[in-house]
Image: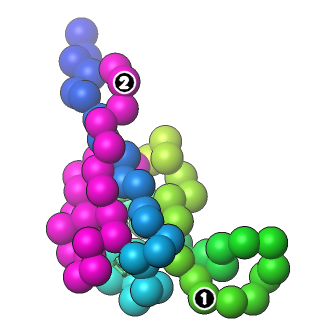
Amino acid sequence: MKSRMPRALPVIDPQRCTGCGRCISACPPHVLWLEVQGPHDWGPKCSTLHDEAHCTGCAKCAVVCPFDAIEMVRQPA
Ligand code: SF4
Ligand code: SF4
């Protein structure tokens, strides 16, 4: 039987994220991208998790962020 590890997902604080893109390069399954926040399709971009199902919870994005904008939040099992 396959055991399910407790998993955490990155939560990105748009107030701290500068859109530097380091987390996007560091993410092995490429589930992060830069997205404009808010109702317009212009303006500053912020890192966004677009494919939760394929995030492994490895936390590489959080470790690499120089602005401490990513917090790993444990998901209920
Ligand atoms: S590394 Fe941090 S500041 Fe840079 S895009 Fe990712 S979350 Fe934003
Ligand atoms: S926790 Fe790992 S897999 Fe998930 S977004 Fe961050 S770097 Fe990518």
| Image position of 75 (left or right of 19) | left
Which part of the image, by quadrant, shows the C terminus?
Answer: top left
Q: Is residue 1 above or below residue 58?
A: above
Q: Secondary structure at mark 1?
A: loop
Inspect this view and state whether residue 42 appears: yes
From mark 2 to mark 1, how far is it between C-alphas? Answer: 32 Å
Q: Is residue 63 magenta?
A: yes
- Residue 31 location in percent, x, y? 46, 61
- Mark number, residue 44: 1
Give the labeled residue for mark 2: 76
Magenta residues span 55-77
Identify the image quadrant of residue 37. bottom right
Q: Is residue 21 magenta?
A: no
Mark 1 belongs to which amino acid?
A: Pro
User: Which residue is outermost to the front?
Assistant: 15
Which part of the image, by quadrant, shows the N terminus?
Answer: top left
- Mark number, residue 25: none
Are there few (<14), some (14-19), or many (20+) residues within 10 Å of tag 1? some
